[in-house]
Amino acid sequence: KAGVTQTPRYLIKTRGQQVTLSCSPISGHRSVSWYQQTPGQGLQFLFEYFSETQRNKGNFPGRFSGRQFSNSRSEMNVSTLELGDSALYLCASSLAGGREYEQYFGPGTRLTVT
Amino acid sequence: AQSVTQPDIHITVSEGASLELRCNYSYGATPYLFWYVQSPGQGLQLLLKYFSGDTLVQGIKGFEAEFKRSQSSFNLRKPSVHWSDAAEYFCAVGAYVGGGSQGNLIFGKGTKLSVKP
């Protein structure tokens, strides 16, 4: 079974621009979560989608948004990029969401904002 | 508030030596606990999980972890470390929000493991 895939793997953007990252979960998984990883703050939860609905959201500004499609693929968008948005963005999929299900992570998208 | 603490930022062990990585959690209910490993430039790979039952859980790559409720700990161990184990290790707890479980993990800050030849 193919794992979680994320595209693109690397991205360089300029302050003020917007960016869209994509995540394809493991086949059959209906929950997709997004995390931001930085050296200073570590791994922080952004949001979780289940059956095309945002079910949970972390403490991030409204510039960070996401969506999930009927095939469970998910995208996250960051508008008006700031230097502090430079990070590794990780997507994770699980069978049905909820803390009792294992989350399987993709390789991440490395975003650099200049 | 739910939290996970990994007291050791960086640990160096010799190849063949035993390893123990510490993890303490703060949680109001029965925790769902996980250990992940991350190699440089990669995503996170699940090593093992604890949900209930036997407090000693076995994982992949020869790792095991022991859940101790009295100490709020979930330490990761390996009897003999290999050079390929050099990576960063993250302990996590499944979050519990409101009246139901939610699909996010709360991570510790990670422990970077270096292995000496």
Image (spheres, coloured by chain):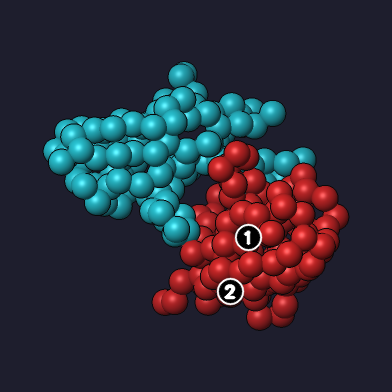
Q: Which chain is red?
A: A
Relative height, residue A2 to residue A41 (above, below):
below
Q: Which residue is drawn at 66% across and 80% down?
A: A71
Q: Can you see residue B86?
A: yes
Q: In which quarter of the image is residue B88?
A: top left
Q: Left or right: A45 with respect to B9?
A: right
Closest to the observer, B35 or B29: B35
Q: Which of B84 and A18 is in front in this view?
A: A18
Colour of the chain lettered B: cyan
Q: Residue A32: image x %, image y %?
A: 63, 64
Q: Depth check: give the residue in front, A99 or A41.
A: A41
The chain carrying label 2 is A
Q: How dense is the environment of label 2, judged by Cα within 10 Å: few (below 14), some, or many (20 and up)?
A: some
Q: What x and y, as percent, mark residue B31?
A: 55, 36
Q: On the image, numbered disc 2 is attached to which residue?
A: A8
Number of marks in the rendered image: 2
Three-letter amino acid code at the position of disc 2: Pro
Instruction: Check the picture and name the quadrant holding the C terminus of chain B.
Output: top left
Q: In this view, does A74 lie to the left or right of A66?
A: left
For marks 1 and 2, give the CA distance. 12 Å
Q: Residue at x 64, y 32 (%)?
A: B2
Tell me which corner region of the image, top left, top right, bottom left or bottom right, holds residue B4. top right
Residue B48 visible at all: no
Residue type at mark 1 is Thr
**Residue at 61% across, 54% down:** A87
Residue at left 52%, top 29%?
A: B5
Q: Where is residue B77 in the image (x, y as percent from the top left)?
A: 29, 35
Taking B48 as reference, is A112 above or below it? Answer: below
The residue pinned by badge 1 equals A112
Residue A17's label in the rendered image is none
